[in-house]
Image (cartoon, rainbow, N blue to C red):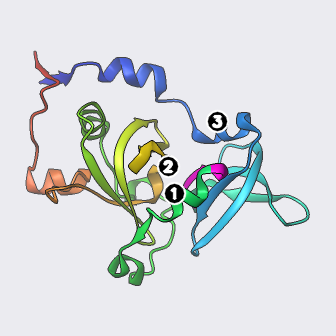
């Protein structure tokens, strides 16, 4: 058995964080991609365990938004320059996938896969449950979310529960179930044997 150099330290420092704390602390509007092909601009008023209380721009009153409905988000001041980079896989969109409430049924990516991709700054393609494709370089991840810098270094945070697929430029899949089924592991230069 071996381990990845630096992974434990990284997880100790970052794993328990949530993008929703960052959004709440910013007191700024963010753009949320929500299931049902909704895009809303909102300010987070409260970060609850399974929901976020938001004030949506242009609407009266507050809304309680279940976190499992949120696919990705980014700062509203970057919205115009980010939207053009989010493409759609029409085949995935046509599947009509709903949010996946049970963690055991989600399309899981291991931390042991994310960490080397982040460290090696490999360009990856995330496909979300409703077909959105986000291409970029992973710059951070926690238990709940993964941050990807798009072209020009613009950050988009993807909620881990909304991931449908993750591949690199060569088309290699990094989903846990795919790698275990096909025994498709590659040893990272960060691997240390014990």
Please state if 36 lies on the left or on the right of 183 as rendered: right
The percent coordinates of residue 26 (x first, y second) are: 71, 36
Which quarter of the figure is the C terminus placed in? top left
User: Start and end of the magenta stretch?
Assistant: 70-77
- Residue occupied by mark 2: 156
Q: Is residue 174 visible?
A: yes
The percent coordinates of residue 134 (x first, y second) are: 39, 58
N-terminal of the pair, mark 3 or mark 1, is 3
Relative to the observer, which residue lies in front, 126 or 98? 126
**Residue 118 occupies quadrant:** top left
Q: Was residue 84 drawn as part of the magenta stretch in this picture?
A: no
Q: Are marks 1 and 2 in contact (CB under 8 Å)?
A: yes
Q: Secondary structure at mark 1?
A: helix
Whether 111 is drawn above or below 182: the answer is: above
Q: Residue at x 30, y 24 (%)?
A: 7
Name the magenta segment's main secondary structure. Answer: strand
Residue count near mark 1 (Cα–Cα under 10 Å), binned few <14, some 14–19, many ≥20: some
- Residue occupied by mark 3: 22
Please state if 9 lies on the left or on the right of 45 as rendered: left
Q: Residue at x 16, y 51 (%)?
A: 179
N-terminal of the pair, mark 2 or mark 3, is 3
Q: Secondary structure at mark 2?
A: strand
Query: Which of the labelled discs sits on residue 4, or is there none?
Result: none
Residue count near mark 3 (Cα–Cα under 10 Å), binned few <14, some 14–19, many ≥20: few
**Residue 93 occupies quadrant:** bottom left
Q: Secondary structure at mark 3?
A: helix
Q: Is residue 71 visible?
A: no
- Residue occupied by mark 1: 82
Query: In 3D space, how far apart are the residues under numbered discs 1 and 2 (Cα atoms)?
Result: 8 Å
**In this view, the mark in front (2 or 3):** 2
């Amino acid at each position: 058995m071996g381990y990845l150099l630096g992974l434990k330290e990284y997880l100790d420092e970052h794993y328990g964080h949530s993008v929703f704390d960052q959004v709440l602390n910013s007191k700024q509007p963010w753009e949320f991609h929500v299931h049902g092909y909704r895009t809303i601009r909102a300010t987070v008023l409260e970060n609850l365990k399974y929901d976020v209380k938001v004030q949506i721009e242009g609407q009266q009153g507050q809304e309680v938004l279940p976190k499992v409905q949120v696919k990705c988000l980014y700062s509203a001041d970057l919205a115009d320059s980010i939207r053009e980079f989010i493409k759609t896989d029409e085949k995935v969109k046509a599947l009509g996938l709903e949010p996946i409430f049970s963690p055991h049924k989600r399309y899981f990516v291991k931390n042991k896969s994310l960490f080397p991709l982040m460290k090696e700054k490999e360009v990856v393609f995330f496909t979300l449950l409703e077909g959105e494709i986000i291409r970029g370089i992973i710059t951070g991840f926690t238990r709940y979310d993964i941050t990807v810098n798009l072209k020009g270094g613009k950050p988009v945070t993807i909620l881990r529960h909304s991931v449908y697929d993750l591949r690199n430029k060569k088309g290699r899949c990094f989903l846990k179930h795919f790698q275990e089924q096909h025994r498709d592991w590659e040893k990272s230069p960060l691997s240390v044997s014990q």
